[in-house]
Every structure is written in structure tokens, then in C-alpha cells.
Amino acid sequence: MNKTANQPFADQPQLWGHPIGLYVLFFTEMWERFSYYGMRAILVLYITAKTMDANPGMGWTDPEALALYGWYTMLVYVASIPGGLIADKIIGQKKAVLYGGWILVLGHTVLAITQDWAFYTGLGLIIAGVGMLKPNISTMVGGLYQQGDERRDKGFTIFYIGINIGAFLSSLIVGYVGETIGWHYGFGLAGIGMLAGMLVFQWGQKYLTNVGNFIGDADNPDREAKDKPLTKIEKDRMLVMFLSFFLIIVFWGAFEQAGGLMNLYAKEKTNRMLGGFEVPASWFQSVNAFFIITLGTAVAGFWYKWKLKGKEGSSLFKMAIGLIIMGLGFLFMRFASQQFEATGSSAMYWLVLAYLFHTIGELCCSPVALSFVTKLAPVKYASFMMGAYFAATGLGNKVAGLLGEAAADAGEKAIFTGIVITTVVIGLIVLALLKPLKRLTHGAEDLVMDDND
């Protein structure tokens, strides 16, 4: 059986208590997310912009745009399954990130061309590129840490902050350029960001020599052990991972209203005047990223200290709490809908408050879920399971698109209220079943302390 190599750990150069390779991956992913979230911030707005506007778009209706958005964002993440398999079976994680990154540069560049064929071709290339890069760069982060190293969760939170620095900057910069200068200039600017990410990744190869490399059967001293069927412990861990993916689908099905329904709500139903300046609708996409950057280390530090005190701090517990907190954020969108029905517009602070709760929930759930997969996945299926995680994210994105489409008939207030009820109930059910679910992990999250902790 083929695998990727992530050894040795002791030889990795360290900076601020973490391998330097973490920061290489941090900046690579930061620029990749700059390109992706920049395009995401203006995609639905571009599709729904009138063809005769000064800044013309495609002239689609809101439901049509949200349907395409749902399919696109689903396929972006579902493509992580073949991307993970290619890494596991053929080229390794590091080359998968490299090839995927350059495909993304090409995809964003093609989107800058103002023709229909370029729009669909560019989206297709981005789907393929993200599918190659996304699961494998995340698996490489996990590969920097030895099994049981409690720094792993903190490392993923640092990595996650990098993602959101890129998202924050892109929503402001690409969003402004796309809305005020031209949509395709915004798409092209996103491609420049991806190019910067690839330059960082290639520069930092000397810090990634021990992670993400492919080893064929002929050179693999453990190949016989890796060919054996999964043990009962591995099967139990796989089961609990797949159960956690259901939580991920629910979480992102709600959360990803940000790029679709909430994006259109900001444009069409929110009073965006601040003094004499009208805030671009796409700028609200930066609020979540801003809160992650400012709150990320505090939330990670809270959970780290909480667990060291002997309190419940398992990944499943954090994910359930995060789902509940994120869901409660949609109460503010319900209040915004009520205000719009009464006055004809809603205040911006409702969106900001919703994104604050969404962010706290995301910080409890998403980076922890990434780390959880790297803890439980058998080595020979490491990238595949990370791909499955992102596929679950993709299915959540499709659910988000379907909910957005349903708002055309049911109304935003009904959709927002339904999200609150669903997320809170499912989160409480997971908390009630926590003990038997934890037993299925067979101690995969037991702490291994070092002298720096």
C-alpha cells in the first residue's frame, strides 16, 4: 500500500513553538483563500447584476444565481475526494498542492476574460484546483505534528487564521474592485493572489522536506502492515469520523448563507449608508474573517486551558457547541427580517451580530474538525478522509444553496428561523450522545505533553 511520509518530527525547525513549515503553509493557504473568497464575494453579485448596468453582469434572477452558487461551491469541495485519492495513491500531498495551485492560477486568470465560455471554464478549473490543493495542504499541517501532540489543535487554529486573513483582505479589495471598477478586474485580482501563494509555497519547500512526500511500495518498509485490513479500532474511528461529517454538512448548510442569501440580503434589503458612504455589499463578507483574526487565538486558548483543567474538551463536544452558537446567530437575521417587514430596510448591525456568532461557532467547530480528521484517519487513508471531510463541506454548501432558493417562496424570516431550530436541536442531540461517540475514538485525543506546555 502506498502512503505519504511525515517523519521525522524532531528534525523540523521551530518558530514560536511550532514547525516553520506551518507558517509556509499558513501563507500559501492565506493567498489561496484570498483568491477563492475574493471571487466568492462577488460571484452571486456578478451573476445577478443586470446586463445593461454600468458594471454589467449576467442578469440572472436571485434563485438562478443561488442555484449555480450551490452547485459550484459543492463541487469545489466534493472535488477534494479525487484530489485526496490522487495524493494518496499517485503523487503525494506536496505535489498535489503544487499542481492544484497552478491550476487555480489558470482558473482565476481565465475568469478575467469577459466571455461566457471563460466564465464556465474558469469555474471548472477552480473546482479542479481546489480539489487538489485543499485537502492535501490541510493534511500536511497535521503531518507536521506527532500523534498525540496537543499543539496540533493550536497549529490548525493558526493555520485557520491565515485562511481568514486572506478572506478578510480579499472581501475588501476584490469586492471593491469588482463592484466599483469591473467584475472581471476583481476576478483577475484574485488570480494575482493565487500566484503569490504559489510563490510562497515553492520558496518554502526547504521547510517541508519531511511532510507530504509520496513513498511507493518499493521504498516503503511498512508496506505489508499498510496492506492489512482495517482493525476494529480503525473501523470505529472511521465510523465516528463519518458521523462527524453529518455535523459538518449541517454546519455549512447554515453558515454558507453568507455568500448567497445573506450576501443578497445585504445588497437588497440592508441600509448600507454610513455617513455619506454606501458600504459595498461584498464588504460584509470580510466581517466573519475579521472576527476570526481578532478572536481566533482567544478561542483556541480558552479551549486549551479548559481541557487542561480536566473539563470536557473533546472535538465532538466543541463541534456541537460551535453548531449551537453559530445557529443562534441566525436569530439576528430573523430580527433583521422583522425590521425590514416593518420599515422597508434593516440595519447593518444585525448582519454584524449574526457574523459575530457565526464566527465564534466556526472557531469552535471548523479548525477542530480539521484536526479531528488528522487524529483519527488511518495513515493510508489520510488524504482521502480529508477529502471526504471537504466533500461533506461541499454537500453543506449545496444545502445552503437549496435553502437560499427556498427563501424565494418561504421568505427569509422562515428560513432563518428554521436554521436556528435545526442547528440547536442537532447540537443538543450530539451532546446527549457524547459518551458513546467518544468511546469510538479509542483515546485518539489523549494528550501527549511536552516540556513547552
Image: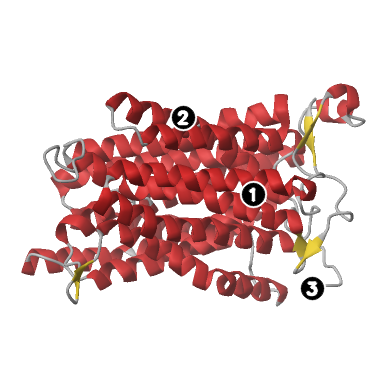
Residue sitting at x 53%, y 47%: 32
**x then y, percent, for residue 103:** 53, 32
- Taking the image as drawn, is residue 225 in sight? yes
Residue sitting at x 52%, y 63%: 363
Give 15 or 61, whichever is nearer the viewer: 15
Q: Which residue is mark 1?
A: 200
**How far separated are the C-alphas under marks 3 and 2?**
43 Å
Q: Which residue is mark 3?
A: 453
User: Considering the image in quadrants, where does the N terminus appear?
Assistant: top right
Give 282 or 393, whichever is nearer the viewer: 282
User: Considering the image in quadrants, where does the C terminus appear?
Assistant: bottom right
Q: Which residue is mark 2?
A: 125
Amino acid type indicated by mark 3? Asp
Q: Label 2 neighbourhood size at 10 Å, few (<14), some (14-19), many (20+)?
A: many
Label 3 or label 2, whichever comes before in sequence order: 2
* Left or right of 234, for residue 415: left
Circle 3 sits in a helix, a strand or a loop, which is it? loop
Label 3 or label 1, whichever comes before in sequence order: 1
Residue sitting at x 39%, y 26%: 121
Circle 1 sits in a helix, a strand or a loop, which is it? helix
**x then y, percent, for residue 61:** 16, 38
Amino acid type indicated by mark 1? Val
Residue sitting at x 25%, y 43%: 46
